[in-house]
Amino acid sequence: MSFLRLNHVSKQYGDLRVVQDFNLNVHKGEFVSLLGPSGCGKTTTLQMIAGFAEVTEGSIELDGKDITRAKANARGLGIVFQTYALFPHMTVRENVEFGLEMRKCPAAERRERALQTLALVHLDKHIDRYPRELSGGQRQRVALARALVIKPPVLLLDEPLSNLDAKLREEMQFELREIQRKVGTTTIMVTHDQAEAMSISDRVVVMEAGRITQVDTPLAVYEHPRNAFISTFVGKANLLHAAVVSGADGERRATVGAVQLALPPGTPLGNKVVLALRPEKMTCNADGTGRCEGRVTERFFLGNQWMYTVDTPLGAMLVSAVNDGDAPREVGQTVGVDWEDRYVRVIGTQGTAA
């Protein structure tokens, strides 16, 4: 049964619709990320859940209760902002206790719960420090502890890791997920970072132009994107435009130039389709073997892998290869590009999302 439900939720400012017909059911204890580019409506959606923005149309239910028109302070939700919003004149412990104090919680209980929550985020040794005396990662954990100490039914995270450097952000992703699993709080996180969303979420809600384009597990979103936007926003993909024909064996095949690819049964004949192929599902063969020949025009070293741009009869294609320590392909080198048909995804008819 859904714990948090958004039913046909829309938000409009004048003539501008920033969120349109948003439908989502979140289960208790689930970690869900709202993922999309700037301006897609993800933060506005979070603000409507929090009560900071009014719902123009639709309704929001929490544990069976309609909270659409409830005031923000009556919803009891925990919120971590991008800027952390810590009180600079308060110590770590005082910051964490603040929400409990506003709820008239007795002093002894406030202190006990604050210390327990700070221990959970590994800051119980820093309770008397001020925010200015903490690192970015420590301030983020204080903000998280302050949100969790009130035992909220839902934790809302508004790009909580975006102010951290790359290495610390990666470390905090997994720490955040570990803490969420320990406390079991239903969590909604807003992010534009696809790696962040994919690594720690139970489900990902991909948004574009105020609408949901796909809701699924991270693996399903990556391996089976529903349209061209998702295939290129979540990871990288080569998009191929092809015509569907019937093979001699009755199978559906797509023709891309002189190359034929097997397609799922039932793909309509004669349709122009858009196919997606991930760079890591392809090989860049120095001996020239493969479905098509090409010339390496660019290469990029990414540490654990090489990314090549290969000029082929099918167009420029991205091909990645694991860095095995051997010499990489050279710019200007002729190579064979190959892949298995099972990695090809049909993501729509030409010019139209599926």
Image (cartoon, rainbow, N blue to C red):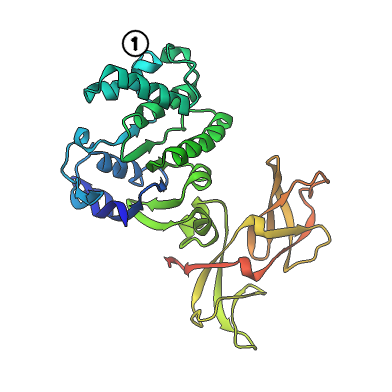
Q: Give x and y (percent) for residue 327.
A: 83, 46
Residue 4 visible in the displayed image: yes
- Quickly name the residue at label 1: 89
Residue drawn at (76%, 48%), measured in percent from left and top? 331
Quadrant containing the N terminus in the rendered view: bottom left
Tag 1: residue type?
A: His
Drawn side of residue 154 relative to residue 173, left or right: left
Judge whether 123 appears above or below 281 on screen: above
Q: Which residue is at the front of the view, 41 or 117?
A: 117
The quadrant where residue 154 appears: top left
Number of numbered discs on residues: 1
Residue 83 visible in the displayed image: no
Q: Which residue is at the front of the view, 257 or 122?
A: 122
Q: Give x and y (percent) for residue 21.
A: 26, 56
Q: Give x and y (percent) for residue 146.
A: 36, 26
The quadrant where residue 283 appears: bottom right
